[in-house]
Structures are given as C-alpha cells and as structure tokens.
Image (cartoon, helix red, strand yellow):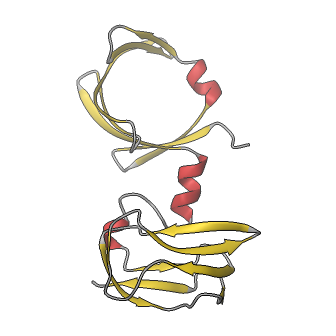
Amino acid sequence: MMSKTFKASVNNTFNFEIKNGDISNLDALKISESEYHIIEQNKSYKAEITRADFNKKSYDIKVNNNTYHINILNDLDTLIKDMGFAIGSAKHIESVEAPMPGLILEINVKTNQDVKEGDPLLILEAMKMENIITSPRDGIIKSISVNKGDAVEKKQLLIEFEA
C-alpha cells in the first residue's frame, strides 16, 4: 500500500513533503467554496483557491494577496516521474526507453505513424505483468529499435520520435 505522503512544489522553486497527519492537524476553516481561514503558529491567513486543475493536480492559491502556483505529487506520481514519464516534460521527449527489464510482447505502432499522447506503443512483460507503454506525447514514430519477442534491459531505447 502506498503511504500518504505528498510532495508539493510551490512556484517551481520550493518543495515540501506533506504527510496526512500534517493535513489533519491544519487549523483551517472553510469560509466558502474556494476560501479558507487558516491559523498556523498563531498567525491568521486568508487563502483562496483561484484556479484548480484536479486532473493535473495543479492549483493557484492566493494567500494574503500573494498568489502561489502549486503542483501536488503523490507516491505514484513521483514513481512515474522517476521512470521518465513525467507530465509536462512530454514536449521534450524524443524517445521511449524501457522503464524496466522485460520482454516485448507486442508492438502497436509502425515507423512514420502519427501517434497521440497516451496511445499504446507496445506491451512490455516484466515480472509476470503486462505493461502497456504509452506515448508520452503527440508525434511521429521515427524508428522502432526492438522487435516482438526481444528481451530488453532497463533504459534500452525502444522507440524514437521525429524531432
């Protein structure tokens, strides 16, 4: 089971680790749908959520008239980022590498094929599980470096995109 620890990045500069207990110990009173009154170390703060993208876990929060851009990652998001499939870095990805050693069971794309972000590229069997490797971005397949039935090592090049 994944622990209830979250990593919060504020303005892409400050990083915090927040545990479930930290949240339940927060002295926050909901004033309206988007506004909160918070007391932290005997100081009073007015906080308002001015923009929320729940799917991307991205928020703009105004605290005492200062706006902060916050991204929240849970353990799974951190694992995905560590594997190289981070949201937001997709525009810069030129290739897909094997996230772990395994066996190529199926290849779902061809060279010069146009793919959309999230489209299944191939199936990698690892640790008796089938892992669908999806496209990290929209693009055109430049080359496929593996064949069905190939054993691959972690970080081995699988697919390259046109620049």
In the picture, the quarter occupied by the N terminus is top right
Which residue does the image show at 63% across and 79% down from the upper left?
105
Residue projecting furthest to the right: 128
In the picture, the quarter occupied by the C terminus is bottom left
Find residue 162 and report its horizontal and vertical position in percent. 29, 85
Residue projecting furthest to the left: 65
Task: Inspect this view and state whether residue 22 appears.
Answer: yes
Q: Nearer the viewer, residue 97 or 107?
A: 107
Relative horizontal placement of residue 20, taking residue 157 as reference (left or right): right
In this rendering, is residue 112 above or below 19?
below
Quarter of the image for residue 20 reads top right
Number of labels in the image equals 0
Which residue does the image show at 37% across and 14% down from the upper left?
36
Q: Nearer the viewer, residue 113 or 11?
A: 113
Task: Inspect this view and state whether residue 154 appears.
Answer: no
In this rendering, is residue 69 above or below 161?
above
In this rendering, is residue 26 above or below 52?
above
Find residue 115 and report its horizontal and vertical position in percent. 33, 72
Find residue 113 and report its horizontal and vertical position in percent. 32, 82
Which residue does the image show at 38% across and 45% down from the upper left?
56
Find residue 138 and report its horizontal and vertical position in percent. 30, 69
